[in-house]
Amino acid sequence: MKIKTKKLSYEKVMSLPRPKHRKPLKPSIFFRTLIRVISVFDLFAARFTFKKKNMEKAGKGPYLILMNHSSFIDLEIAYRIMYPKPMCIVSTTDGLVGKAWLMRLIGCIPTQKFVTDMTLIRDIIYAIREKKTSVLMYPEAGYSFDGTATVLPKSLGGLVKRLGVPLVNIHTYGAFLYQPLYNCLKKRKVKVSAEAECLLTAEEIAEKSAEEIQSIIEKAFTFDNFAWQYENKIEIKEKDRAVGLERILYKCASCGKEGEMHGEGTEIICKACGKKYELTTLGKLSSEDGEKFDHIPDWYNWERECVRKELLEGTYLLDTEVEIGMLVDHKALYMVGKGRLTHNSNGFKLTGCDGKLNYEQKPLSSYGLNSDYYWYEIGDVIGIGDRNCLYYCFPKKDGVVTKTRLAAEELYKMAKENK
């Protein structure tokens, strides 16, 4: 999937009119059926199956549907399970670029990732109460890098309490392995399944506190795709399964060097010390001379600990040249030229466009970071910004996106602790 891009000067982009807010639309049966039909081919290729649990308790709807975000077929999975019930979908603004009219007709509610948006809450309430349609959300707001759950907003319990409609969870199995983000979204021969479960009825929501509801949601979003693969003996025999793995495992567990890891074929190798690991068909890491980590999420958590240590010691710093894309409307991603992105304990600073662009973002502005691999086939990206403008930064330096996401998450925790 690609996104429409256009080269434009920074001044012209900033002078463009911002799109007016529009209330969400209830998707017609025509568009619901269209998506259902189109999705048949992808779901057939993934040998998709699903089951429902306690859904009779949920009644006819509408519901708030929370789903883990693992692959590009997640929306098709949701439509397969919920069809023919109408559904609005909370989606990122970049998903509307070049096709806003169509995305609105299928029920999309646009929002900006990791940017405070009270309008989104009002739109969700409007869709459920006025349009009598369910709302689908991916509360993680982004794909998992290492196959485990990402940070959830602490406001979810309060939102569920405020809406007062049944809470449904759709949990996928195999979707992360079927089309992993780190592997440039190459499809594998993995069977995908899902389970739709009514976590809470309206009556149960009324009886519980927001904190209790939050705890139930966080428990439902506790998973480990690589552990699931190993436990269920799911073999992935593709010969390029380790390609791109250095995006996740950017720091060598043996010599500690960063940016020297390289995934090739079925192996990931450190070019600095020569340490070599094989990614087995069951998703484990194996080395002839022993390994510090055989489980990818354990390595990833170790990298997180290393980043936190750098932050505490005051040695953490990202300083890289970037290509800058700006998003201010739904017409295009505007490429405005080169710039410099820095990130330290004070937050982000983006400069460029011959000195005209100077944007800063503090650690407490967001609990997470809009970051992605192979974003719309352009490249790895770090996204920052506010309600006025989003900046998509494509680093010239390899292997910095993961570390920056970890640093942003840890900085937010530290800032909250200090506050």
Image: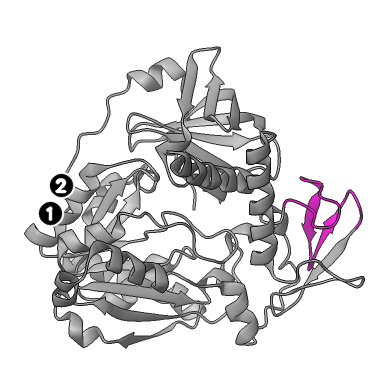
Does 80 sit left or right of 132 as displayed? right
Disc 2 residue type (three-letter): Lys
Query: Marks 2 and 1: in contact by CB < 8 Å?
Result: yes
Q: Label 2 crowding class (10 Å Cα cut-off): few <14, some 14-19, many 20+?
A: some
Can residue 368 be seen here? yes
Residue for badge 1: 126
Residue bounds of the magenta highlight: 250-274
The percent position of residue 215, horizontal first and vertical second, equals 35, 68
Q: Reply above or below: 15 against 96.
A: above
Does 18 sit left or right of 86 as displayed? right
Residue for badge 2: 23
Q: Which mark is residue 25?
A: none
Res. 320 image quadrant: top right
Residue occupying the point 39% across, 45% down: 113
Can residue 379 be seen here? no
Res. 365 image quadrant: top left
Q: Quadrant of the C terminus?
A: top left
Q: Reply above or below: 244 against 402.
A: below
Q: Label 1 crowding class (10 Å Cα cut-off): few <14, some 14-19, many 20+?
A: some
The percent position of residue 173, horizontal first and vertical second, equals 49, 78
Q: Provide the secondary structure element on which disc 1 rests.
A: helix
Does 126 sit left or right of 328 as displayed? left
Q: Reply above or below: 82 against 330.
A: below
Q: Is residue 322 magenta?
A: no
